[in-house]
Amino acid sequence: MDQYPFTVALSSGYKEIAGGRTRRDIYSLAIVFVVAFFVRILLMLLFKTYHFESEWDYGYEYARIARWILLGEGFSSPYYDTPRPSAVMAPGYV
């Protein structure tokens, strides 16, 4: 008696791999991912969505804290123009 009576033998082109997906399924998903990635990059370059006027346009408080860190002022408050000690945001997120 067969342990799995309802299994179907697949042809050599459709051998099952991890998770029950066939090679063709994995290949199709990879193609969709690659095309979507390049469309995203193309649209980003076309509309120039990577340009920001200031750190407030991208990241808000976290960008200001990161700016202070990069300028060597340490983990400082994002709400002032001069560096002051801060505990506003968790350091792991910056």
Image: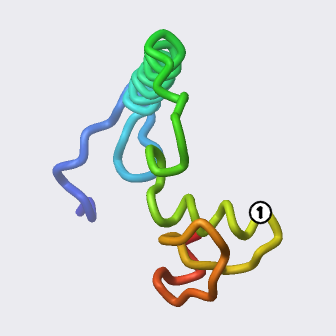
Vertical relation: 15 (above or below) 91? above
Vertical relation: 88 (above or below) 44? below
Q: Amino acid at mark 1?
A: Leu
Q: Position of residue 53 (x, y in %)?
A: 52, 35
Vertical relation: 81 (above or below) 49? below
Q: Which residue is at the far right?
A: 72
Q: Position of residue 57 (x, y in %)?
A: 44, 44
Vertical relation: 86 (above or below) 52? below
Q: Which residue is at the far left?
A: 6
94 on left or right of 49 = right
Q: Position of residue 23 (x, y in %)?
A: 46, 31
Instruction: Read off the residue under disc 1.
Output: 70
The image quarter in which residue 15 lies: top left
Residue at the (56%, 86%) spot, across then down: 86
Q: Quadrant of the C terminus?
A: bottom right
Q: Position of residue 25 (x, y in %)?
A: 37, 30
Q: Nearer the viewer, residue 21 or 94?
A: 94
User: Would residue 42 be visible to someone looking at this image?
Assistant: yes
